[in-house]
């Protein structure tokens, strides 16, 4: 039986994704990405085949990003907090290259 990580969405990222993602294909990919993030086995083995989760470089805090869909550029930013995953932001495809700039613009969301 699959074990799940607890996921916290205090900033309404799931609601924003539903409203902002431009296609049903991306909305389904977002749900699949969340499912992979909740899978404890992926965290234990550090293997994220769909989302390719990795730590953001160039930032002092431990912030991670995951692909919703690599070709579209949409990304999920999150942090770990006391064993839970705290969703921080969903980044539009056109902004994913300016990661540090996006994080600094919404620094109140990041711990």
Image (cartoon, helix red, strand yellow):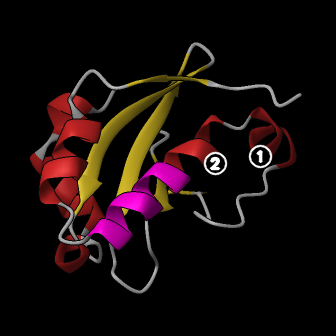
- Where disc 2 sits, the SS reads helix
Residue 29 lies in the magenta stretch: yes
Q: Image point 41% across, 86% down: which residue?
A: 71
Q: Position of residue 11 (x, y in %)?
A: 21, 28
User: For the residue carrying disc 2, how many other residues have a C-alpha within 10 Å: few (<14), some (14-19), or many (20+)?
Assistant: many
Kindly identify the residue that appears in the image at 62 percent across and 35 percent down: 38
The quarter holding residue 98 reads bottom left
Question: Which label is found at residue 36?
Answer: 2
Task: Give SS at disc 1.
Answer: helix
Residue 73, given in percent of the width and then of the height, sits at: 34, 77
Label 1 neighbour load within 10 Å: few <14, some 14-19, many 20+: some
Name the residue at 77% across, 46% down. Answer: 42
Q: Of the numbered discs in the image, which one, if any, rests on residue 78?
A: none
Judging by the rendered image, the residue that carries numbered circle 1 is 42
In the picture, which quadrant includes the C terminus?
Answer: top left
Tell me: residue 78, above or below residue 104.
above
Where is residue 19? Give x, y as percent.
13, 51
Image coords of residue 6 (percent x, y): 57, 20
Magenta-drawn stretch contains 89: no
- The answer to which of marks 1 and 2 sits earlier in the sequence is 2
**Pair 1/2: label in front:** 2
Q: Nearer the viewer, residue 39 or 97?
A: 39
Task: Tell me which secondary structure the magenta stretch mostly adopts.
Answer: helix
Q: In this view, does 110 lie to the left or right of 16?
A: right
Out of 110 and 43, give the one closest to the viewer: 43
The answer to whether residue 104 of the structure is visible from this angle is yes
- Residues at discs 1 and 2 in contact (Cβ within 8 Å): yes
Residue 104 or residue 29, whichever sits in front: 29
Say if residue 61 shows up in the picture: no
Q: In which quarter of the image is the N terminus?
A: top right
Q: Which residue lies furthest to the top in this view?
A: 82
- Tell me where the magenta segment starts and ends, as one range: 24-32
């Amino acid at each position: 039986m699959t074990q799940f990580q607890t996921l916290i969405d205090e900033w309404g990222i799931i609601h924003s994704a539903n409203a902002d993602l431009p296609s049903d294909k991306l909305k389904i990919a977002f749900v699949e990405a969340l499912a992979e993030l909740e899978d404890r086995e992926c965290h234990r083995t550090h293997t994220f085949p769909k989302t390719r989760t990795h730590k953001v470089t160039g930032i002092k805090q431990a912030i991670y990003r995951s692909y919703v869909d690599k070709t579209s550029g949409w990304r999920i930013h999150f942090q770990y907090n006391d064993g839970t995953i705290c969703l921080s932001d969903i980044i539009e495809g056109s902004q994913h290259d300016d990661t540090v700039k996006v994080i600094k613009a919404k620094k109140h969301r990041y711990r």
